[in-house]
Image (tube, grey):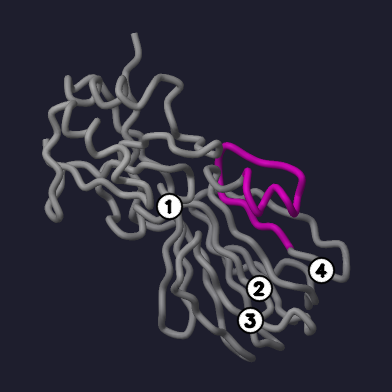
Amino acid sequence: MKVIVFGKNKGKIEPAVRAAGFTIVEEDPQFVVTYGGDGTLMRAEHAHPGIPKIVLKDSLICKKCSRITNEEVLALVRRDRYTIEELMKLEVTAQGKTLYAMNDIALHNEDARHAIRYTVSVNGKPIGGTIIGDGVVVSTPFGSTAYYRSITDSFFEVGMGLAFNNSTEQSDHMVLKENSEIALKILRGPAVLYADNQKDTILVDRDAEVVFRRSSHTARVVIPTIA
């Protein structure tokens, strides 16, 4: 099996990957072995989208890491004892650009000293009036225990979460169906869009429309079959 090993400390795990019978390559892998935690998994998905990820632990924060050892994970996968879990991804489009995320997408005021003003509609239906605040966070279930939870003090397992960040008036957070489309109209900016922990951003200003939806792409995570 051909794999790419991904992570800032990947040199520490590469001997175990080779010892398990995998061939480490630079391109055209069957799997990507991520060595780290949730952040490493997200960066690997951005760098190698859609390729199944074998998640090995080198972090205290790793929701998709197995309870067994890294060596045991590799041995099970090498023996074809695994399933592949497909995780929902989001996409956001604005200014003719698109970002993808498996965790969450944040729209945030570019200048922390100045709130932004915007309106929201879900599936074409307006939700409330003008909202003033720092922006919104749209989350997948996988990402709902991160930024979304810090705002709402809650998480969810199915759907798409919409959280309002530090709005001046009460704005109820929402868990929507996965096929929902969320559209924001920026009335006063500037604001910036972030997806997961990626470096790429989109700057949006007055009169820009920002659309969030479920992506047709998914992230694929290898789950070892433990007897």
Helix, strand, or loop for circle 4? loop
Report if residue 147 lies within the magenta region: yes
Mark 2 / mark 3, whichever is N-terminal: 2
Image location (x, y in percent) of residue 124? 59, 69
Disc 3 packing (10 Å; few <14; some 14–19; many ≥20): many
Mark 4 / mark 2, whichever is N-terminal: 2
* Vertical comparison of 79 with 201: above or below: above
Q: Is residue 135 left or right of residue 139?
A: right
Task: Place residue 123 in its image quadrant.
Answer: bottom right
Q: Are marks 3 and 4 in contact (CB under 8 Å)?
A: no
Q: Which tag is nearer the camera, tag 1 or tag 3?
A: 1
Q: Are marks 4 and 2 in contact (CB under 8 Å)?
A: no
Disc 1 packing (10 Å; few <14; some 14–19; many ≥20): many
Q: Which tag is nearer the camera, tag 2 or tag 1?
A: 1
Instruction: Give the Cα separation between the discs numbered 1 and 3.
Output: 23 Å
Helix, strand, or loop for circle 1? helix
- The magenta region covers 145-164
Give the number of the disc on residue 108: 2
Q: Are marks 2 and 3 in contact (CB under 8 Å)?
A: yes
Q: Is residue 138 left or right of residue 56?
A: right
Instruction: Give the Cα separation between the discs numbered 4 and 1.
Output: 28 Å
Q: What's under tag 1, amino acid-wise? A: Met
Mark 3 / mark 4, whichever is N-terminal: 4
Instruction: Give the Cα separation between the discs numbered 2 and 1.
Output: 20 Å
Q: What's under tag 4, amino acid-wise? A: Ser
Disc 4 packing (10 Å; few <14; some 14–19; many ≥20): some
Q: Which residue is mark 3?
A: 191
